[in-house]
Image: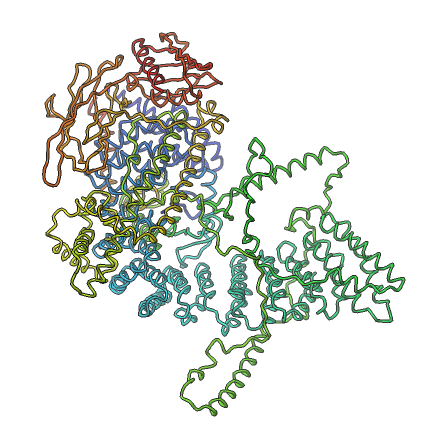
Amino acid sequence: MIKAILIFNNHGKPRLSKFYEHYTEDTEQQIIRETFHLVSKRDENVCNFLEGGMLIGGSDYKLIYRHYATLYFVFCVDSSESELGILDLIQVFVETLDKCFENVCELDLIFHVDKVHNILAEMVMGGMVLETNMNEIITQVDAQNKMEKSETRQPETIS
Amino acid sequence: MALKIVKGSIDRMFDKNLQDLVRGIRNHKEDEAKYISTCIDEIKQELKQDNIAVKANAVCKLTYLQMLGYDVSWAAFNIVEVMSSSKFTYKRIGYLAASQCFHESTDVIMLTTNQIRKDLSSPNQYDTGVALTGLSCFVTPDLARDLANDIMTLMSHTKPYIRKKAVLIMYKVFLKYPESLRPAFPRLKEKLEDPDPGVQSAAVNVICELARRNPKNYLSLAPLFFKLMTSSTNNWVLIKIIKLFGALTPLEPRLGKKLIEPLTNLIHSTSAMSLLYECVNTVIAVLISLSSGMPNHSASIQLCVQKLRILIEDSDQNLKYLGLLAMSKILKTHPKSVQSHKDLILQCLDDKDESIRLRALDLLYGMVSKKNLMEIVKKLMLHVDKAEGTTYRDELLTKIIDICSQSNYQYITNFEWYISILVELTRLEGTRHGHLIASQMLDVAIRVKAIRVFAVAQMATLLDNAHLLTGSMQRNGICEVLYAAAWICGEFSEHLENPLQTLEAMLRPKVATLPGHIQAVYVQNAAKLFATVLKSQEGNTDSTTAQETSQLMIDRLPLFVQSANLEVQERASCILQLVKYIQKLQQKDVEVAEEVIALFAGELNPVAPKAQKKVPVPEGLDLDAWINEPPSESESEDEQPKAIFAKEEPKHSRPRHTEVDEKELARRREARKQEQANNPFYIKASPSSQKVYQDAPGVEHIPVVQIDLSVPLKVPGLPMSDQYVKLEEERRQKERAEKKKKEKKKRKEKRSGRGKKHDSGPESEEDITPAHMVDIVTEEMPENALPSDDDDKDPNDPHKALDIDLDKPLADSEKLPVRSHRAAEAPKSPAEDGDAESAATQEPKKKSGKEKREKKKDKDRDRKKSKEEKKKKKHKHEEKEEDLLGGQVEEPVVQSEETSEVAAPPTSTTAEVSDLDFWLSNAPVPSNTQEAATVAAAEAAPVPEAALGAAPDSEPDEPKDTEMEETKSSKHKKKKQKKEKEEKEKKKKKKKHHHHHHHSDGGGEESVQNGTVEEEEPLPPMSNYCLLAENSYIKMVYDIQGNLQDGSQVVVSVIFENKCDSFLKSMEFNVLDSLNSKLQRPEGSGPHDGLTVPFQLPPGVSNEARFVFTVQSIVMPQKLKGTLTFIVKNEDSSTHEKLDFKLHFTCTSYLITTPCYSDAFAKLLESGDLKGSSVRLEGVNMPFHHLLARICFHHHFSVVERIDSCASMYSRSIQGHHVCLLVKTSGQTVSIDAKCDEPTLLGNVLDEIKQTFSQC
């Protein structure tokens, strides 16, 4: 199970937070801050797994993260997930974002966090991995966007 | 033109969208908070508008603000509004917002049930998808219960996109509503073989997640997963399955044997590192489960270790990390194979990556031996010096102690060395682990008698140099070691060289700055030292030393008498008076030493840490019983810091007990403080500097001048552990030399070829003898201690409720609820309790059924055994009866997965279990299974439809076998009883949970239940299902519910139960429509065609079908005639049968439970639109809350408010009529005043209520 997915930039500003378990807003912010603190002090070429720390609680959980340019992608997972598998999943996620936004950069995430959520929803659902095939994810995302577009056009055609 | 105007107005409304908001926030970096608060004001304005587009935009912005940490729960209702928009665009925004900020205590969630249900059944797959995604984040127990059936249907949706989502969300549903697991499981299992890989992967995902927590229930799926493993090419699926097997193997070693070969093949063939790694992991799990059972698995271990070494040597830090992680698993069972890679692991200790260093440290733990302990610890000590961060250094410290103290100091050959290591560790600045070092010192000094002289000397030096520890390290726990030092010096003072000096050190004024509990030990042990000094001076003609010592005590002790710490004060004043008395005696030249020494006579023995826990509870003593009744009101609980990602596990096996204790203590403390504050004679705590010791072992508050020492501390007189390493090496060499000499002698004497192995003497462990005569005193245990270890399972684990036997066939009571409306919550709780109870009463029935099955299982197994034996012997069958038996035994074997599914459920259980046995006992190659199965099938061919007939056929044999199995079955019974207990406990817990839930549910209902719930007796079981018709083949019960979404529809749920031994199929349900009510038939069918019931009924099975009726007027009850036709199929014949029935549509069935707040209720009554009516019920002999619960349950009302014996209730018809009741009771008379906007409807409802109560 995936406990949480966080994206924040090099300064710890949240760009996306998805918690699959309920926390209050304050706790969520605290988690983001602490996670940023833990992750940001690590060198570039160390391993992508982090354990321990009060934050994660219990030895069953791990932070698995990747750092791309200005953004950190952090997944908090328990032992039922394959570590390398999640790393792959992060890669798929980023590649999907890249396809959907055409050369994704931090600004895309800043201004279109809702779209990022929609893409993520096609990959992970309720903390479980739903789809890992990038083409399938993009097909579904595109189909939904198309629906949205047709809905915005509708009122015009009626009037 | 018109278009432009419309567009313009829309533009104006969209004055700020998400992008604008984000841009605005970025432009207001200085006054972000202020800017956002104006934005929130704008959003609030936007939410007030009717235009859904504006609302959706506002909600979208709120979702963004939520991410920034703003609480947006106030907009929950608006979110629900946006969710229910018919446009996908807005719906998606709404569901996203809901998934981000809804949780179990969001009260508007209960309003969403019908909306979600509607979306789930939407023709647009993306509506359904969005609803499923949202629901997966905020599903509550109520939603899970109400929607379980709908989601289960979606698992068979035509679109794989929906199927996979529905399958995944079932896991969440199971967690929130464990009762749904058994009914939904068969379909979930089906999905493992779904044609779509995504759906398959989802099903694997869910089952793996379930099995991880309760593996034993999923063992029977092993063959299916095995098949998937050998056929699937999807690495995600493979990884999950392989992980699952890792969880299953410990339960079934035979499974492990079967797995090794395909797994090793995968290891050799795959190029995906993730898959390789998981394979290695599972092979390790298999090897652990086999442990020493199989001699030829060393090759597999070698393979694993070899692959892991490759991972560890890889330049990719991730692989290195995982390699070490897996290596530590092998270490537990096969330490030897890991030890050969010591070089590599020690190398990892130097890695720049802390995660990797920590992993390597873990490994070291298992790699030490007598031979290399000193070397390894030396290396670790070097790291301690080098370590920059305190966390890593503390980790090193604990690891050193762990490594050395493991299995009773097994690997320590030289305790002097160990003590000096401990002393060296005390020089760590800022460690949190002072107490750990202290307890080690105490432990070693107490349990290793031979080391005491040395230990005491070291501790005395430590005490002498205490200022070095406490001076610059005030802020850390290292001063804890002084506790140990003082105690050791005092207790074993006879070994002290210069007790007087130590005594002097212990009474220095600076001691008063130490924490209270340490001072107390100082004072007490000063007295012990004093006694020793007196003893040593005894017989000495010159008594000045003794007298000087007494004077020293008298001079210094008053400092402690003033201590704010009660313990210190008390001890000090006692001892001070004692010394004063002794001084008097000394002045009279009386010899006192013997008597003083007698104060501290006797030796303390170490007590095992678990000893207290293991003292058996004497008979007749109930530890959980209250000594005093608990206080009536609940005290506010101490807030405990919560772990963020995982729930903290309670430390004790009896958390409830301790919690109560803590509460009680807190209460008493509070009361005491109060009392003290009010008591003028009580001297209030003054803010003196010493006061803080009272409650804080931490010493942060002590004002001390920091001494800055840049030079590393080298305490004079303290040993350096390094020298021991050298000494030890020399000693061992000497020993070896001596041994060799001896051996040579021996060999000369014996000259036999044996014993060559002794040549490798220096390598073998046993040769290293400890430097001291080590006498490790074993820890004491109480007499007749209980041997068992406590169960460590966390009772609060939500997965415990999912520990459900899935092979058991479904019982009627387990059908998923299909009632369409659950909107109003609280009043139903008593009814639910009733449900639970009715389930409980059914338990015995189930039990007996299970017992039978269990026996059968046993029998099958036995039969197979006997059969195998027979085969081995290859004798002719002599008894015909036996032969017959053998024929039958084959049946379960024949049944492959497919046939067992078709077969009647009672047999399928046995079939599955024996399937597994068969599968496991077979040759390890997977294809063999299938071949064997087909061969067996061919053999059994003469018996057609064996699967169907199996159950009844085997019945007559039972009496013969039971005698033989008596002993076995009794064993089983015991097990079962345990299980039942567990189940009962679970039920209890669930009930509690419900209660809790309803309490917290809040809303208008709270006033109803406040405080009364606990006192009220439970309700008798109730059911809305009433008999429709019945004959010898079939029984039908039904319930009618209104449909909120469509004011002209009601749903009739009919449960069909097969009562006979035959198969019932082709059931057709038909009703003669009236003008007012019509059965909804699919398009294209005529008005008199029947509806096919979408299932068949095997013997003893029941299932539920729903039929939709349209009604025009709902003010009058009415009856519809109908017929059910069906085919009864026996083995040799089939007959057409029919059954007539009458459907009774009561007016009640048009009512829908709708919650209503009291103010809205009052307004409704004031409006004057309603017409009144009333009814009196006489002789109602039941508690008031039962009465209310019945009205709520049977007539779909909800309680608005209840005051004593008077309650107001509300309900709404599907066509929107309001029905209000005022129920009063006095004695056995109940009067109901009612108001409704439709008098006819009201009259009929009241009549029906009256009838309900006349029946009971």
Is residue B234 among what the camera can see? no
Q: Depth check: B676 or A107 in front?
A: B676
Quadrant of the drawing holding the C terminus of chain B: top left
Q: Quadrant of the N terminus of chain B?
A: top left
Residue situated in front as seen by the camera: B1088 or B810: B810
The residue sitting at 27% across, 31% down in the picture is B119
Q: Nearer the viewer, residue B341 or B820?
A: B820
Q: Quadrant of residue A138?
A: top left
Q: Is residue B76 among the parts visible in the rendering?
A: yes
Q: Say left or right for B814 vs B386.
A: left
Is residue B1067 or residue B304 the one in the foreground? Answer: B1067
Residue A137: x, y in percent? 25, 44
Residue B852's quadrant in the figure? Answer: top left
Q: How is the image coloured?
A: rainbow
**Quick check: B502 above or below B1228?**
below
- The answer to whether B269 is drawn above or below residue B806 in the figure is below
Q: Is residue A97 above or below residue B113?
A: below
On screen, residue B627 versus residue B4, left or right, reads right
Is B997 above or below relative to A34?
above
Q: How many marks?
A: 0
**In percent of the image, x 23 and y 13: which residue is there?**
B1113
Q: Is residue B1115 left or right of residue B575?
A: left
- Measured as percent of width and height from the top left, residue B1171 is found at 35, 7
Q: Residue furthest right?
A: B588
Image x and y of residue B977, in percent: 39, 46
Which x, y percent locates residue B426?
A: 62, 62
Residue at figure coordinates x 50%, y 70% from the top left = B376
